[in-house]
Amino acid sequence: MAALMRRYGVGARWYDVLSGERPVYRAGRQAGIALLALSPGDCVVDLGCGTGLNFALLLEATAPSGIVIGVDRSPDMLAMAQRRVDREGWGGRVRLIRADAAELLSEAVAQAVIELRGGGDGRADALLATYALSVITEREEAWRRARATLRPGARASIVDMQPPHGFWRVLSPLARLACATGGADISARPWRMLERDAVDPSSVRRVERKGGHIVAVAATVSASDVPR
């Protein structure tokens, strides 16, 4: 994990350019956010927010008063995310929390939500994890703690990677290289946790992009109880 932290620290400044965001991975973000079916004013926890590539899409989907709580363990990634927030003037709608997802305290998220909303119970309306859970070794614990930040009946969306199929299979070596460079486990398929924990199987929605390399799954989930 220390090696992975160093990798993200060194690459934070160039992540947006070198990660294949525009040609490949932005499509997954767009699909995952669309599946959440967000409403104006919603609060979204962005787990593993990185440099904040989801923020503009989430703020647009929850405008004019929705808020985003970005969580990441890399100080370098969060520094880039904060620069994005400051540059775009999103300070009134975005808060960043530095935390290991497997050690995330729902109380910290609740405090940030209450500060932005000026009150309430601090529960989030939705959870988004894009290309994050496949990087986390303790993903079950991270998933459990992330769900503890949600209100009853909230929706969650997981966007992640698997080997492409069909015509896109020719890009498998590149896909595996990209995952290895970022420290992701291409065989993790973390969306299965979401499918398993859906309150109602009929609430599960799934789409694939780029020949199945990108999978986005959303569902209504139950909150979990963990130490605050």
Image (cartoon, rainbow, N blue to C red):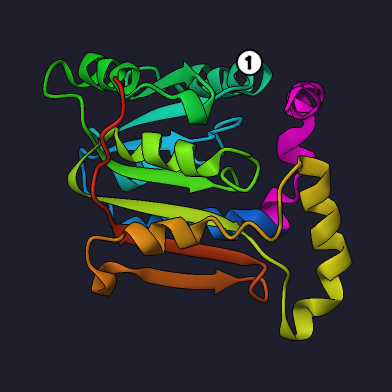
Provide residue 60's location: percent of width, then percent of height: 36, 43
Residue under the point 76% across and 78% down:
168
SS of the residue under disc 1: helix
Q: Which residue appears at 28% of the width and 71% of the height?
A: 201
Q: How many marks?
A: 1
Residue 193 in the image, given as x and y percentages of width and height: 44, 56
Figure check: 17 above or below 101: below
In the rendered structure, does residue 65 fall within the stretch colored magenta?
no
Q: Give the quadrant of the N terminus.
A: top right
Query: In terms of depth relative to the viewer, which is nearer, 161 or 53?
Result: 161
Could you say which quadrant of the image residue 16 lies in? top right
Number of other residues with Cα within 10 Å of mark 1, as a class: few under 14, some 14 to 19, many 20 or more = some
* Residue pointed to by mark 1: 75
Relative image position of residue 130 (x, y in whole percent): 54, 47
Q: Residue at x 63, y 15 (%)?
A: 75
Give the left or right position of residue 185, taking residue 143 as reference: right
Q: Residue 20 colored magenta?
A: yes
In this view of the protein, which residue sits in the foreground, 74 or 29?
74
- Apparent side of residue 34 relative to residue 159 in the rendered image (left or right): left
In this view, the residue farthest toward the left is 120
Residue 65 appearing in the image: yes
- The range drawn in magenta is 1-23
Q: Which residue type does callout 1 highlight? A: Pro
The residue sitting at 68% across, 18% down in the picture is 76
Q: From what the image shows, is residue 80 above or below residue 207?
A: above
State which quarter of the image contains the C terminus. top left
Dominant SS of magenta comes to helix
